[in-house]
Image: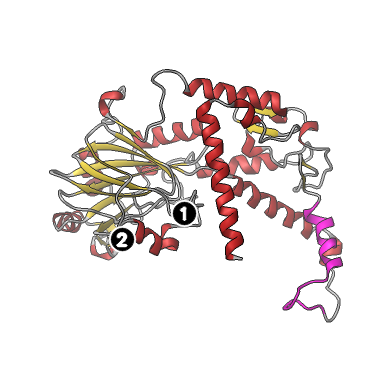
Amino acid sequence: MEQKMTSHQTTAAQFAADRLANFQAGNVAALIDQYHADASVITPNGVLRGRDQIGGMIEGIIAEFSQPGVDFKLLSRAADLPRSFDDLFSADAVDELVSGRGLRTPFLRMAKEGTTLEDRSFTRGGGIGAAIADQASDDAVLQHFADGATLVLQGLHRTWRPVVDFSQSLAAELGHPVQVNAYVTPPGNTGFSDHYDVHDVFVLQVAGEKRWRIRPPVHELPLRDEPWTAHRAAVEEAARAAPLIEETFAPGDCLYLPRGYLHSATALGGTSIHLTIGVHAWTRRHVADELVRAAVARASRATQLREALPLGTDLVGEGAASDDVEVVRANGFERCIDRRGIHCCCVCGTETTGLDQEPGLERRNPKSCLMACSGCDFTAHVDRHHQKASGAWPVGSRNEGPHSGRG
């Protein structure tokens, strides 16, 4: 089994390397060859069908990245960017949030040398008229900060108006949920040891300088339920190797960290303040989750699946008999998708003849049309979920709390 897995991983790695080489060489024919003749690709601008349309998209991408001066960079210096980040956040914003806004956990937390401090060590009760016990204590926060702890202001996409406006606009443009945190680190200190995030991150250095160390992933493209702690040993081992990138960030600099990349940072001569803009990308795994959820809902409505299994069915050994499995497939799962796309609507059961037969489908948001049909409102459900996750609810809404992130 181990030999087979290693062989599969090698094949996948070689496939990725060949694809990158073909892209860099501008070999459109080789890239198109990887698609079936009747393949369909969903893009933000519509559905591309067949090798001709997909090839046109690939040619356009290669042409754009082949222009002189066009490059993919992780680090952008302030001098290369059109403006600073002063309109988003500042040291004065930190002071106001800590001492004047009555923030509660988890909208703030503190950490030192990779260890998160107990909430009660920097919070207190709200006093008369405020029956809460976890409001920020500005004097306790300052004491911990003086002792070398990093202050983390979480969920600024909910609490600081300039960031709220920016993050909502960015989420709408990207089509993916966005979160924003701020990290305030005293000179010479490191708030968090090497780790990775399960979302893409843009780091905006607002004040002071920070030395960043970036290392390759130990787990490629981690999903939201695959935190770095699940790979702690591999992360700690990788942290002992030389960094892939080690650079000092100054105010106005921007770093892009793809999800999964290990990173840690140390403040230098003065107090460092940086923002992390986390982009929680929707993936095909989310599509799979929705398909399974909807298929189970459909199956629950089938009378045949409500019937008891025959007496003596072995659910501990080999499981349900093959004919029972076939009944489940026929009533809930196998009919939901075929290789072209939609075979039936998993929400209401309306039969369709595939993606190509759904009029107007290519004009819909790809996240919202995967199981749509004319007889149900599945798209509204997905759109509401997307609006909620992108932070588009009014500030102060209790529908969803701030996302966490180590920074």
Q: Which residue appears at 49% of the width and 38% of the height?
A: 392
Picture coordinates of residue 322 (x, y %)?
Answer: 83, 67
Q: Quadrant of residue 129?
A: bottom left
Closer mark to the observer between disc 2 and disc 1: 1
Asked if residue 400 is positioned above or below residue 233 in the image, the reply reads above
Q: Would residue 339 be visible to someone looking at this image?
A: yes
Residue 26 lies in the magenta-colored region: no
Residue 219 circle label: 1
Left or right placement of residue 183 versus residue 27 in this view: left
Q: Which residue appears at 39% of the width and 32% of the height?
A: 166
User: Is the N terminus in the top left, top right, bottom left or bottom right quadrant?
Assistant: bottom right
| Secondary structure under the numbered disc 2 in the rendered image | loop
Asked if residue 225 is positioned above or below residue 374 in the image, the reply reads below
Q: Nearer the viewer, residue 60 or 321?
A: 60
Q: Nearer the viewer, residue 190 or 129?
A: 190
Residue type pointed to by label 2: Asp
Residue 276 circle label: none
Picture coordinates of residue 38 (x, y %)?
Answer: 76, 33
List the single residue furthest toward the bottom.
312
Q: Which residue appears at 14% of the width and 58% of the height?
A: 147
CA neighbours of label 1 inside 10 A, class few (<14), some (14 to 19), many (20+): some
Q: Pointer 2: what residue?
A: 134
Q: Would residue 175 be visible to someone looking at this image?
A: no
Q: Which residue appears at 52% of the width and 44% of the height?
A: 388
| Residues at marks 2 and 1, CA–CA distance in whole angstroms | 36 Å
Q: Quadrant of residue 169?
A: top left
Which segment did they paint magenta? 313-334
Q: Nearer the viewer, residue 20 or 70?
A: 20
Left or right placement of residue 41 versus residue 63 in this view: right
Picture coordinates of residue 282 (x, y %)?
Answer: 55, 43
Left or right placement of residue 327 versus residue 114 in this view: right
